[in-house]
Image: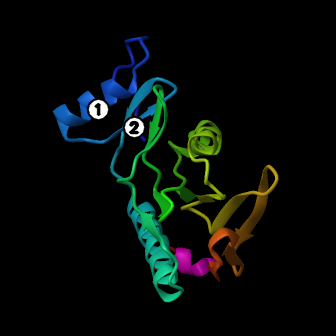
Amino acid sequence: MASAITKQEARLYTLNDVKIAEEKTGEKYQLIDGRIYSMAGASEKHVAITGNINTLLNMHFRANKIDCFPYSSDLAVYYNDKNYYYPDIAVKCLDGEIKIIVEVLSKSTHQDDQTIKFDNYILACKGLQEYVLVEQDVMQVIVYRKEDDWTLGHTYREKSIVELKSIGFSTPIEEFYYWVMK
């Protein structure tokens, strides 16, 4: 995520402001607590990891005839008039609910992905079952799960089998990092 569009201005922006900016520029923006951020281009690692996970999930849904689809970063999640995001991957099912959100972490998004965005995703997506944070510089995946409440499900590292229990998915962590950790 790049810096806020106008650092000099102290005003907070709304969802309408984001929509106008996106229309005018053809670019995507996120709104975090009323501050607009340009969606900067992702690193090669980020793109490869996101592509790998998206492909794995899509193959899993097709093979198991699960009526869900992994959307890449073009599906917006709207929380309120001050918070509007494009998660790296959002798994949406036929019931219309987003069941899983995946964020691939970078230095500029790490803090927001683990705090503000996580809290807002929980409130915005009533059907959300798992929130997945994927490091791009080390082989580590953190999965939060909704059980009675939200808990840290598991931290996966090298030679682990990553599980997304809400969709019956499991794969060696190395599959998320195919081509990245060579």
Residue 112 image position (x, y, % from top left): 57, 39
Q: Residues within 10 Å of mark 1 (few under 14, many from 20)?
A: few
Instruction: Determine which quarter of the picture holds residue 9.
Output: top left
Q: Visible in this render: residue 113?
A: yes
Amino acid at pointer 1: Lys
Residue 13 image position (x, y, % from top left): 40, 20
Q: Which residue is at the front of the view, 14 or 104?
A: 14
Q: Which residue in the protein does label 2 denote?
A: 2
Residue 149 image position (x, y, % from top left): 80, 49
Instruction: Determine which quarter of the picture holds residue 31.
Output: top left
The answer to whether residue 57 is above or below residue 75 is below
The answer to whether residue 62 is above or below residue 57 is below
Element under disc 1 = helix
User: In what quadrant of the picture does the N terminus appear?
Assistant: top left
Q: How many marks?
A: 2
Seen at 54% across and 86% down, the residue is 64
The answer to whether residue 157 is left or right of residue 149 is: left
The answer for how far apart the CA atoms under marks 1 and 2 are is 18 Å
The answer to whether residue 119 is left or right of residue 179 is: right
Seen at 59% across and 38% down, the residue is 120
Numbered badge on residue 174: none
Q: Which residue in the protein does label 1 denote?
A: 19
Which mark is in front, 1 or 2?
1
Q: Which residues are magenta?
A: 173-177
Seen at 65% across and 78% down, the residue is 168
Q: Residues within 10 Å of mark 2 (few under 14, many from 20)?
A: few
Residue that sits furthest to the front in the current view? 95
